[in-house]
Amino acid sequence: EPGGELMIIHVDSQDRIWANAFSSTLIGETPIPFSINLIRLLANGEVDVNFNPPDLYHLLGSISPLGWVNDIVEMPDGTFILAGGFTSINGQERQCIAMIEDDGTVVDGVIGNIGPDEAVWGSVERTPVITNIRLLDDGKLLLGGSFSSFGGEDYHCLVRLQPQPVGTNNAVKKEGLRLFPNPASGSFAIQVPAIHAGLLEIEIFDLSGRLVHAKTNHPSDAAIEIEKLQAGVYVVKAQGAEGVYSGKLVVE
C-alpha cells in the first residue's frame, strides 16, 4: 500500500523547518520510494512558497535513483549547504554536497564536484553518502558519512573541507598551509610543500566568510602585509597550480 513519511532535517535561524517528504509504494514486501522532495515549512507550519525545492538524484548503487538530504548547515551569509545522498542537483553534478541560495538556487563555484567517491572496506562496498555536516569556528566544514575516498584522496568517514570557491579540478589537500608568525601583526609569511611552491593566489576571509584581502601572483616566499586587518581570527587560502591550501591565522 502507498505510504508517506516526513523527516525533519533542520530548523534554521528563522524557525523554518526543512524536511524530506517521502512517498513510497510496495514492490512485494519492499517499500520503494517513488518521490523524495526537500520541502521547507514556515514557523506557522505553512509551506514556504518562496522556496523552490531542488531536484536531487543519486545514481551510485542505490536501489532508487532519487536523491535525498541528510543534514543542512546555514552559513553566515544566508546560504545553505546540503549534504546527503545525491550525485546531481538541478542537473548539475555534485558529490553529496552542494550550496544553495535561500530560494533554492544552486550556487556555482563553491565546493565544486568534490565529495565522497567510494565506500569500500575489504569486500564490503556501500553507496557513498554524507550523513552529518557541521560548521566549525575556523570556517571549515566537518563532514561525516560512509566513504573511504573523498576528492580522490583516502579519507575514511570523516573529513574537513573549506567551503570557499575552488575549481572543480582541485583535489582536497592533506598538507596544511603553514603560517608564521602566528599570531601575527603587521605581516606574516606562508609555507606550502616545496614541490608546490611558486606564484599563488592569496585570499583571506573572516569567520563570517567575507573576503577581506586578496592578492594574485604572490610569490610563495614573500611576506603578506596585514596592517589594515583588525584583531581576530581569519582563514587564509593559498591556491596554486597544484591545488588549494588553507590555514587559520590569528591577528593581534
Image (tube, grey):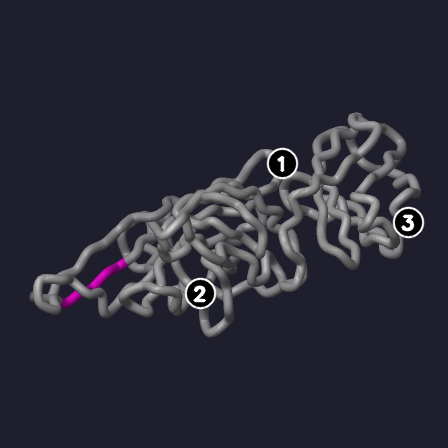
Query: Dot 3, crowdedness within 10 Å: few (<14), some or many (≥20)?
Result: some
- Mark 2 lies on a secondary structure that is loop
Mark 1 — residue?
138
Q: Position of residue 95 (x, y in %)?
A: 49, 60
Mark 3 — residue?
219
Q: Who's the residue at 74% across and 42% down the image?
A: 236
Q: Earlier in the sequence, mark 1 or mark 3?
A: 1
The amino acid on which the numbered mark 3 sits, given as a three-letter code, is: Pro
Q: Position of residue 106 (x, y in %)?
A: 51, 65
Mark 2 — residue?
87
Q: Is residue 74 magenta?
A: no
Q: Say if 60 sits above or below 172 in the image.
A: below
The amino acid on which the numbered mark 1 sits, given as a three-letter code, is: Asp
Q: Who's the residue at 80% across and 50% down the image?
A: 196
Query: Dot 1, crowdedness within 10 Å: few (<14), some or many (≥20)?
Result: some
Report the disc number at residue 211.
Answer: none
Left or right: residue 248 versus residue 2 is: right
**Residue extent of the magenta highlight:** 21-25
Q: Earlier in the sequence, mark 1 or mark 2?
A: 2
Q: Nearer the viewer, residue 243 or 237?
A: 243
The amino acid on which the numbered mark 2 sits, given as a three-letter code, is: Thr
